[in-house]
Each structure stands twice: as C-alpha cells, then as structure tokens.
Image (cartoon, coloured by chain):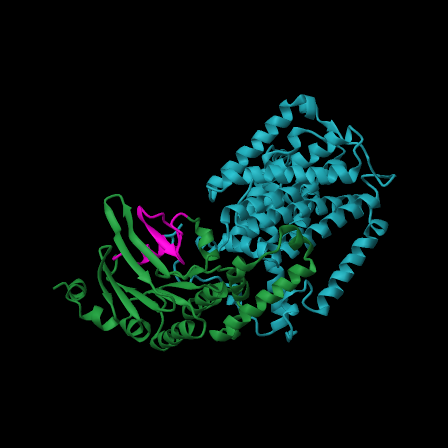
Amino acid sequence: MRFLFKTDYEDDIRLFPHSGYIVSYGVLLALLAIAPFVLSSYIVSQLVFVCIYATVGVGLMILTGFTGQASLGHAAFLAIGAYTAAYLQQFNVPFPVYFLAAGLLTGVVGALVGFPALRLQGIYLVIATISFAFIVEEIMARWESVTHGNEGMRVKTMTLFGTVVSRDGPAFYFLCVGVLILTIVGTLNLLRSPTGRAFVAIRDSETAARSMGINVSLYKVKSFAISAAITGFAGVLFAHKLSFISPEMFTLQLSIEFIIVILIGGTFSLHGAVLGAIFLVMIDPFLTYLKDDMPGIIAGVAATFGAGKSAADAIQNNVAAFASANGLKGAIYGIIIVLFVLFEPLGLYGRWLKIKLFFQLFPLYKRATFKRQKIYVKSERNR
Amino acid sequence: MSYFRAEDLSLHFGGLKAVDSVSFAVEKGEILSIIGPNGAGKSSIFNLISRIYPPTSGKIYFEDQDITSEPAYEIAGLGIARTFQNIELFENATMLSNLLVGRHRHSTTQLWQELLFLPSVRANEKAHRRRVEQVIEFLDLEAYRDKLISGLPYGVRKVIELARALCSEPKLILLDEPSSGLNVEETSDMSFWIRDMKTELGITVLMVEHDMTLVNRVSDRVIALNYGRVLAMGSPAEVQRHPDVVAAYLGA
C-alpha cells in the first residue's frame, strides 16, 4: 500500500496524485492509440460508441452526479447537437464551426431548460425533463423545413482540414477519443475549482450552499448549460457515426440508456461514466447473442435431461419467441437498474475501488468498510 | 449607530407569531447570546437574518445598510456567516472541500478560466487553501482533511461547521446552538474558541444557546425570548435574575 506524504498544496490540486497514475493512464493512452490498427473494425466501431456514450455520461454526471439534478431529457440535447450539425452541413459550414455551434446552441437550450428546473426537485424535475424531451422529439418530427421530419436527415462524411474523415476510419476514432479526453480534463478542472465545489454543495445541502454565498439558481443553470453543451458536442459525433438521423432515434429509451451509463458506472466519479459506457455498449452484442444462441442451448439442455425431440423443439420455439419479444430490452435495462441500485449503489467503479482496497489491505479487509450508516437523521426543516 | 440592528422584526406563520416585533442591536466585537425555552423563536430569528424566511414585517440593518431584502446568497457576501442547529454540511465531500466552499464568496475566477485551469485559478486555489489551513489550525482539525463528512462523528462535524463559517472570513457570525450534542469537554473547547473568535479574529458573535454554563462563560450580553417576544436584555446575571425569565423557564 502506498502512503502519500503531502508537502505542498499542489499535492491536493494536481490531477495525478502520484506517479502510479501517470504510468497507468499512459499505458491506457498507448493502448487506445494502437487500438484501431490491431483490433477489428467492428470493435473499433464499438469503441467509438463507447467514447460518445462516455462523453454524454460525463455531461450527465456533472448535472446528476455532482449537482444532484436528475434529467431524463439528455436524448433531446443529443438530438439538438446532431440536428444542428446536419443542418449547418447543408451550407458547407466547416466541421470545427458547426461542432462549436452545436455545443453552444445546446448549451443555451440547456440553460433555458434549467430555469424552470430551479423550482423543481426530485421526481418533478424528472417529469419536467421528460416533457422537454418529448417536446424536442415532436419539434424534430414536425419542423420539416429544417429537420425533414420523420424522413430524417443524411449526414455527409466529415471533412476536417481538407481531408475526408470516414466514420469507420481511425481518424474518426481518434477524434472521438480526443473529444472524450478533453471533456474529462475540462470537467476535472471544473471540479477542482470553485464552480465544481459549488455544484457539490448544491447537491448535498442547498440551504447551506446558499448561506455560504452560493447563488444556487445561477449555478443550477450553469450546470444544466455545461451538461447540455457537452451532450451537444457528443451529438455531432453521434450524427457522423450513424450518418443518418431521424426523430425516432432520440427517444426516452436513449435518455434512460444515459442514466444507466452513470448509474451503473457509479455516480460519484467520472470513471463511472466511462465504465458505464463500456457496459452499455457491450450489452447490445450480448443481447444479440442471447437472442440467437440461447434458444438452441436451452433446447439442447432440455434434450440432454430426457425431454423428447418434439418437446425440445417446442421449448426452443418458446424461448426464441420470448427472446424476440417487444420491449425485452427495456425490461432488461429496468432489471439491471433495479439490481444495481439495490446491491451496488456505488456502481462498477465503486466495485473496482472495493476490489482494489481488498488487495491493498489483504488479509485485513473488513466487509463493513463501505457499509453506509446513518449517524443521525438530517433535518428537513429548511428545505 | 449600531453594528447590526433588527427593528420590529416579525415572522408570522398564519396566526402563529413565531417572532413578534423583536428589536435588538449588536455592537461591533461583542458576543450576544439569545436564550429562551423551546419554540421561543430563537432559530427563526437566525433564519430571518440569513433570509431563509422573508420577515412578515420589520427591518434588518448591518453596517448601516438595509439587508432586509437582499437575496439569501448575498448575505454571506456581506460578511455574515452562520452555522445550523442540526448541522448542514456537504455530507459526501471531504472536509477540505467543505471548508473551501466556505471560501466561495472570495472566489473571483470565471467559468472559462476554470475549465482550462489557468495559472490564475491555480494561484487562487492555493491562496484559498492557505486561509483554510489557518482555520484548520485554529480549530485543531488537522486529522480530518481528506475524510468524508459522512464518516465523521457528530462532535467533529459541529466543529467543521464552525470552521466552514470561519473560512468565509465573516465580520458577524451566527451560531445556532454551538454546543448541542457536545459533551462537557467539547463544550468547554467550544467556549474557548468562541472567545478566541472575538479576541483574536475580531469577529462579532450572535449566538443561540441553551447551555447556560456556556452562555455565562462567553456572553457579553444576553437576550431572553419567549413566544417570539423579548423578555429581558442585559448582562448574563441580570437576565437570569429577571422575574419574567424565571417565570418563563420555571412556569411560576
């Protein structure tokens, strides 16, 4: 176990507390750098989705994880970013310009959503953000002169500094990784400055935050704007990756997927956004596998245990019908959320920290180390 | 003119007069305690000053400025810090970040500078940290810098809340029952700190307190309240002898 001996205030400010971090993140960076040249194009494509989801996750983490404001409307922010890119592309606006414009516009919309959110808390805020998402979805479907309605919009291949950046090539992958890294670094910078601390203060006690001189309304709006802007940036990349966007892509289910990203990753750290994104992107191939192979496997097992041929076939058909039932994916998402909230509220990153501590302290780890206990009941009077 | 003044301050919840035209003044550099039975309106006065509730009527002046209609977050900016009776700390943050939030009113950096963490932000952070360390030393909190609040015992939290208020470098500090839940030893530490705040840091203290030992030890003047009205005002000994105060406590 490493004991840090702090001798300077800088020790609490720097991003990498000790050399071990530099080594491990250096290795990670090197692996990410060689990934597109050694991995199959399918996996690289999945990695691009991980980066996009993780970027949205970081944005949502600022709002939900650090400021404590729930949102089920982030699919709408993603849509605004994506549509801004697709719309501006028609006028031959260069990528850097419409990339920034999309982030800026989404940030402004986010701030506007933040204003009504000032008076709402908890479940009411969730409902308000859902309604916002539905409004945006409806606008995308009806404002045909701009969005082409339900026909959707084609997104042209990106050209960056005169070169064509194909959505499947390594250049696009590096762009997505770069955006993710910049987002994370920017967010970490924010979190170690007064603004980030104000966010956390609002999350934990609005009354105390106010009495410490924090303009709670202003910082909530700031949090909404930053979160939305990051999601808008991700939306541009999302549009390019899919090369076609239409209103039915940005549904409530996508917003729920973003919530899953941070909830399963762990809402208290940015690591959670990345881990959650990896989990969510991996779940899709896994579900496909279940759908394709599971019926056969179960039928095979049944046959081994003495079920007749016809019975085994019936089982196979039933399982196949169940596996391709509508809404199964949503149900599985729901079950995953419930199980994580009940059994692993700190998420995958929390689990990782526990495993790490187990080995650091071996054999002295106590099971109750992470047990949360209420020492006293918090006053609800001043809310 | 007095340093801090409340004039005819009232707070009514429907027919209930929690605070009923209370007037008092605090002189610069004194320790003024407010005592009274439960429900006398002591904490309500604090909540009026820190603008958690708007007063039904009356005016509040600080340094000859009318602060009755300032928004709640501006109160700290004027140099009035407070603690809460039931501790309102930022539970899922370390003590250091709690104390650094106390420095919020002194932060001058802009959002875009913070996103890039420019050298100016870094220098500011270090300056804030230096001030925070002075408070940590003043209140003997060195052992808890990187500890999460949610894991700390009640007595320590109470001190951390005081520390957070001190980090904002207030001119006037409002202490809502600083000794509630503390044992005898912790209470006597608290009384030393309160005196030191006055003598070493030059902070004016307005405090709500039930523990008469602490009140007698630190207060320059005492106000006794009951049913939202002022019963008596004066030195601790005078107030305790006042027949109305005796009646309020003993029910004579």
Q: Residue at x 78, y 28 (%)?
A: A91
Figure colour of chain A: cyan
What are the residue bounds of the magenta stretch? B40-69
Magenta includes A354? Answer: no
Q: In which quadrant of the rendered view does residue B196 lie?
A: bottom left
Image x and y of residue A17, in percent: 67, 67
Q: Quadrant of the N terminus of chain A?
A: bottom right
Q: Nearer the viewer, residue A113 or A267?
A: A113
Between A376 and B33, the one nearer to me in the picture:
B33
Give the residue at x 63% y 38%.
A77
How many numbered circles are shown? 0
Nearest the viewer among B175 and B173 is: B173
Residue A238: x and y in percent read: 72, 39
Up/down of A68 relative to A367, above or below: above
Q: Which residue does the image show at 56% across and 37% down from the upper left?
A: A112
Q: Residue furthest front?
A: B1
Q: Which chain is green?
A: B
Whole-percent x, y for residue B169 in the image? 49, 65
Residue A147 at x, y = what percent? Answer: 69, 26
**B236 left or right, relative to B137:** left
Q: Is residue A38 left or right of residue B32?
A: right
**Front residue (pair A111, B230):** B230
Q: Is residue A312 visible?
A: no
**Up/down of A265 relative to B242, above or below:** above
The reply to whether the magenta stretch includes residue B59 is yes
For this view, does A330 lie left or right of residue B17? right
| Corner quadrant of residue B226 | bottom left
Residue found at the far left of this picture: B252
> Does residue A293 lie above or below A93 as drawn?
below
- Answer whether residue A150 is visible to the viewer in this image: yes
Residue, x 57% and y 74% (percent of image)? A364
Q: Quadrant of residue A300?
A: top right
